[in-house]
Image: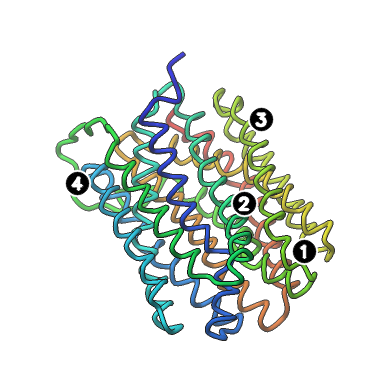
């Protein structure tokens, strides 16, 4: 069996972790930062934070085109450098307007960097281990998404509520990713002649629009819960220092599901993993929305982690298996666009609902959209993938 953890794969896995870690180190605490520093209300916070995702969504379709057309290493280095440089904006922003501008612009390099990095991962993986390898690659995102908030909350307490050291840490961590980018040895892309310069499927994987719409529903739910979990715990449950435990339990669930699901991915049982993940995670969202208690708060984290750890890598492989070899960048940009669109809509909708109707309405809304995604999957998406997959 070909080696999975080769040197280039380890490097791009680490780049992916550092990229998301520098990002998620501050994300869950931004609502608190905007509220305490600028006096923003929940609706304003939702609008401010949604700008980042909107820009990532706008750039993602073009990211796939750029990644499939130009040298991927160069694209990765340039975008990661811009991503790194914009962290300085958080340090100098003296008003809510300035912060919103920097935060919104930050979505552009993040959108392109994530597409380029995941496409590089596909390139450096042996074909016989690609499905399994992309499952493990996604674990870097998950670990960063979980470890970042845990450390952020700990550091915030250690620095007596001062957010500036967190921004400095994200600035430095993102720079380390650039150093690793420079050491990558990426194989040259095969030149494909007589290809149409402009066509819609160079910007979005048209074969995967059903999968994209289904995934958007699941991302919507995650966007609401992950963004407002800290401020909800503080205001409604009196949990001032337990958000770190929430994300720790989410991490344990993610890791366990990745490890137990890797065999199914290696055997190409993609829809099995997706089905299992969706059914588990929807129970977690139900528990979070229906029961207002610390036990449900923490228990739902573990359950959602278990579900998402099976579901997301399965959908990632769906997109890859529906795409031609020369559409790898487009496939990656399409799944990330879908996820970002769902998360962004969740952040925005969650802010509006929690401001006017309370947190309960926001979390019930997250559950309702999650159920809609499950219905769509069983009614349309699963059969479509099985019929049209290329590998």
- The one nearer the camera, 379 or 280, is 280
Viewer-nearest of labels 1 and 4?
1
Q: CA distance from mark 3 to mark 2?
A: 26 Å
Residue 263 % position (x, y): 60, 25
Question: Residues at badges 2 and 4 in contact (C-beta under 8 Å)?
Answer: no
Q: Can you tell which mark lies on residue 298?
A: none
Closer-to-camera residue (315/228): 228
Q: Position of residue 49 (x, y in %)?
A: 50, 72
Alpha-carbon neighbours of circle 4 within 10 Å: few (<14), some, or many (≥20)? few
Residue under the point 38% across and 76% down: 92
Pick the front one: 96 or 354:
96
Q: Which residue is mark 2?
A: 376
Q: Secondary structure at mark 1?
A: helix
Q: Nearer the viewer, mark 3 or mark 2?
A: 3
Please give the residue where the numbered disc 4 appears in the rendered image: 196
- Specify which label sits upstream in the sequence, 3 or 2: 3
2 with respect to 180 (left or right): right
Sequence-wise first label, 3 or 1: 3
C-alpha distance separating marks 1 and 4: 49 Å
Q: Which residue is mark 3?
A: 260
Q: Pointer 1: what residue?
A: 289
Sequence-earlier tag: 2 or 1: 1
């Amino acid at each position: 069996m070909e080696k999975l953890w080769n040197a280039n794969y380890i490097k791009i896995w680490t780049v992916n972790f550092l990229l998301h870690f520098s990002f998620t180190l501050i994300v869950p605490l931004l609502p608190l930062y905007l509220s305490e520093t600028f006096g923003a209300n929940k609706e304003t916070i939702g609008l401010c934070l949604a700008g980042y995702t909107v820009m990532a969504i706008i750039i993602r379709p073009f990211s796939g085109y750029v990644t499939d057309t130009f040298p991927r290493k160069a694209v990765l280095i340039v975008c990661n450098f811009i991503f790194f440089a914009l962290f300085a904006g958080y340090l100098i922003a003296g008003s809510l307007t300035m912060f919103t501008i920097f935060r919104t612009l930050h979505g552009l390099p993040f959108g392109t960097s994530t597409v380029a990095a995941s496409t590089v991962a596909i390139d450096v993986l042996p074909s016989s281990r690609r499905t399994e390898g992309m499952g493990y690659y996604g674990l870097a995102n998950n670990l960063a998404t979980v470890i970042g908030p845990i450390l952020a909350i700990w550091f915030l307490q250690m620095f007596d509520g001062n957010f500036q050291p967190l921004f400095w840490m994200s600035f430095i961590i993102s720079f380390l990713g650039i150093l690793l980018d420079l050491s990558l040895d990426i194989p040259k892309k095969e030149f494909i002649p007589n290809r149409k310069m402009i066509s819609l499927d160079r910007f979005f994987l048209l074969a995967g629009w059903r999968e994209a719409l289904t995934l958007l529903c699941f991302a919507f739910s995650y966007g609401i819960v992950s963004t407002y979990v800290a401020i909800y715990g503080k205001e409604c449950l009196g949990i001032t220092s337990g958000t770190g435990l929430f994300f720790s339990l989410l991490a344990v669930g993610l890791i366990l599901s990745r490890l137990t699901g890797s065999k199914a991915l290696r055997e190409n049982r993609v829809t099995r993993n997706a089905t299992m993940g969706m059914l588990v995670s929807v129970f977690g969202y139900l528990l979070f929305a229906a029961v207002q208690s610390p036990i449900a708060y923490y228990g739902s984290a573990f359950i959602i982690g278990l579900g998402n750890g099976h579901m997301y890598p399965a959908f990632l492989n769906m997109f890859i298996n529906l795409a031609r070899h020369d559409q790898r960048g487009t496939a990656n940009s399409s799944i990330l666009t879908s996820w970002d669109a769902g998360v962004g809509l969740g952040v925005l909708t969650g802010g509006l609902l929690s401001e006017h109707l309370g947190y309960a309405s926001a979390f019930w809304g997250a559950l309702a959209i999650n159920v809609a995604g499950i219905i769509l999957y069983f009614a349309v998406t699963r059969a479509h993938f099985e019929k049209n997959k290329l590998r």
